[in-house]
Image: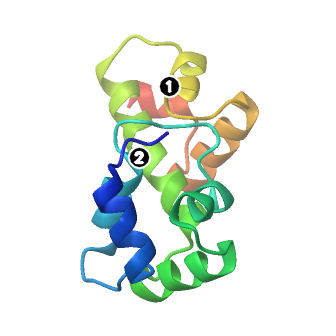
């Protein structure tokens, strides 16, 4: 579903997500998240992909990166949304969908919370 091959998936299952310095990069690579902003991307779906419990995955991610996994997912999506807002003419609704937010109101709320401005205000500045 997220494009990692059997070799990588096997390593993840065998090593139970090894703690490495580039843990964020490893999670992005393993999930294909940098190219696939799946709307069902959350701690539960990732844990299922890694054959781990959501609590264990969340704990290890937090220990390594000092950020909650759901916050990481939102930050990664918003990084892409900022690029699209500045560099394209897509509507805010299209950008929300392209970055994995099926609920447009949630996209606006998260964007404003994280950026301090609405998507339209960000685009204008």
* 85 up-or-down from 109: above or below: above
Answer left or right for 88 relative to 102. left
Label 2 SS: loop
Answer left or right for 75 relative to 80. right
Answer left or right for 16 relative to 101. left
- Image quarter (top left, top right, bottom left or bottom right) of the C terminus: top left
Taking the spot 33% from the left edge, 33% from the top edge, the residue there is 83
> What residue would you read off at disc 1?
98
Dividing the picture into quadrants, the one containing residue 124 is top left
Q: Dot 2, how many residues are within 10 Å of its Cα: few (below 14), some (14-19), or many (20+)?
A: some
Taking the spot 35% from the left edge, 83% from the top edge, the residue there is 18
Residue 118, position as x, y percentages in the image: 58, 36
* 84 up-or-down from 69: above or below: above
**Number of the front mark, 1 or 2:** 2
Specify the label residue 33 is tagged with.
Answer: 2
Residue 62, position as x, y percentages in the image: 51, 82
Residue 85, position as x, y percentages in the image: 40, 26
Q: CA distance from mark 1 to mark 2?
A: 12 Å
Specify the label residue 28 is tagged with.
Answer: none
- Of the pair 3 and 39, the residue shown nearer to us: 3
- Of the pair 121 and 50, the residue shown nearer to us: 50
* 25 up-or-down from 36: above or below: below
Taking the spot 73% from the left edge, 32% from the top edge, the residue there is 103
Label 1 SS: helix
Residue 91, position as x, y percentages in the image: 52, 13
Q: Earlier in the sequence, mark 1 or mark 2?
A: 2
- Of the pair 118 and 84, the residue shown nearer to us: 84
């Amino acid at each position: 579903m997220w494009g990692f091959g059997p070799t990588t998936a096997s390593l993840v299952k065998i090593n139970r997500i090894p703690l490495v310095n580039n843990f964020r990069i490893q999670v992005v690579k393993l999930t294909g998240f940098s190219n696939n902003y799946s709307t069902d991307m959350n701690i539960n779906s990732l844990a299922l992909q890694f054959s781990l419990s959501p609590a264990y995955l969340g704990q290890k991610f937090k220990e390594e990166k000092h950020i909650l996994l759901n916050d990481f997912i939102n930050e990664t999506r918003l990084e892409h949304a900022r690029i699209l807002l500045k560099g394209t003419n897509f509507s805010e609704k299209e950008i929300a969908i392209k970055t994995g937010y099926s609920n447009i109101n949630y996209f606006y709320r998260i964007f404003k919370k994280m950026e301090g401005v609405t998507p339209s205000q960000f685009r204008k500045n």
